[in-house]
Image: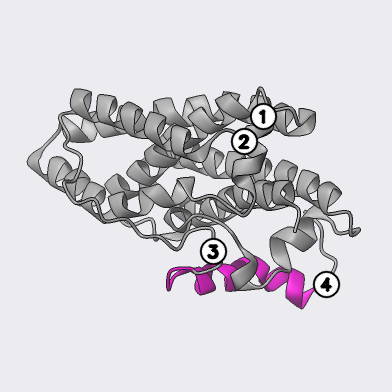
Amino acid sequence: MNPLYQYILKLADDTLIFGQRLGEVCGKGPYLEEDIALTNVALDYLGQSSNLYKHAAQIQGEGKTEDDLAFLRLEKEYLNCQLSELPNGDYANTILKVYFFAVYQKLLYGALSASKDEQLAGIAEKSLKEVKYHYTHASTWIKMFAGGTEESKTRLKNAVENLWEYTAGMFAATHGEDDLAQLGIVPDAKDLHEKWKQKVTEDFTQFGLEIPESEFMQKASRTGYHTEYFGFILCELQYMQRTYPNCVW
């Protein structure tokens, strides 16, 4: 399988699944403005996935559409990181998920903007503008939680403990990704991970938060193996397309 196709597919799957999951918050925000803000983040994710699936379909060259790739694959064919499919949980957990992912995407799209694949570079440059907002929004909330009441601090610390072991999955590489990095098409995943940890550590120091001491990380991301939550997401996500074939976005 084409390594570039798989790489773009994993990015598209991340944003599709995260967008689907975050969309569950619509109508449940703590107040109207924040409800709309997170709904817009979810829509940004879906827009990114649409652009990425289109590019992946072109590379695959089998006449498939973005809808085919988004809605008509089997569970084991999705390459998203497991962080994206975890339940939203309470508001601290939801915001922290967005924060971790925003730091990752900000570094990722910044690097991909210089990709030798011009179409991928264009998608990254456009998406980077959105991701910078996601980061500002999420980090502002985390700063408020960390400096708030004992309840908000406790919930935020619990969220860090819940999510931390899934963060390395964002940087899990697909087959042939190292070769793509050497060709200047994609960034090196290990280097990206180090920069992510450095940025998160800097932010956590400012927030008054501590990085978990445990080095254990879940290792199944990008392999087609998912958490127990993924099947339920996929059922909702694919229902319309499988019930009414040839629906379009």
Q: In whole angstroms, how far apart are the C-alphas of marks 4 and 1?
A: 39 Å
Q: Which residue occupies the foreground of this view, 62 or 16?
A: 62
- Return the disc, 1 or 3, that comes first in the chain's sequence: 1
Circle 1 SS class:
loop
Q: Nearer the viewer, residue 240 or 9?
A: 9
The residue pinned by badge 2 equals 181
Q: Amino acid at mark 2?
A: Ala
The span shown in magenta is 226-245
From this view, report whether residue 77 is shown above or below residue 150: below
Residue 238 position in % (x across, y down): 67, 69
Q: Residue at x 11, y 37 (%)?
A: 149
Q: CA distance from mark 4 to mark 3?
A: 28 Å
- Amino acid marked by disc 1: Gly
Q: Relative to residue 193, is residue 67 drawn left or right? A: right
Q: Which residue is mark 4?
A: 245
Q: Is residue 233 visible?
A: yes
Residues at marks 1 and 3 touching, judged by CB atoms closer than 8 Å: no
Query: Sequence-wise, which precedes: disc 3 or disc 2?
Result: 2
Residues packed near mark 2 inside 10 Å, few (<14), some (14 to 19) or many (20 plus): some
Residue 151: x %, y % from top left: 12, 45
**SS assignment at label 4:** loop
Q: What residue is pinned by disc 1?
A: 184
Q: Which mark is residue 223?
A: 3
- State left or right for residue 172 relative to residue 219: right
Q: Residue at x 44, y 42 (%)?
A: 35
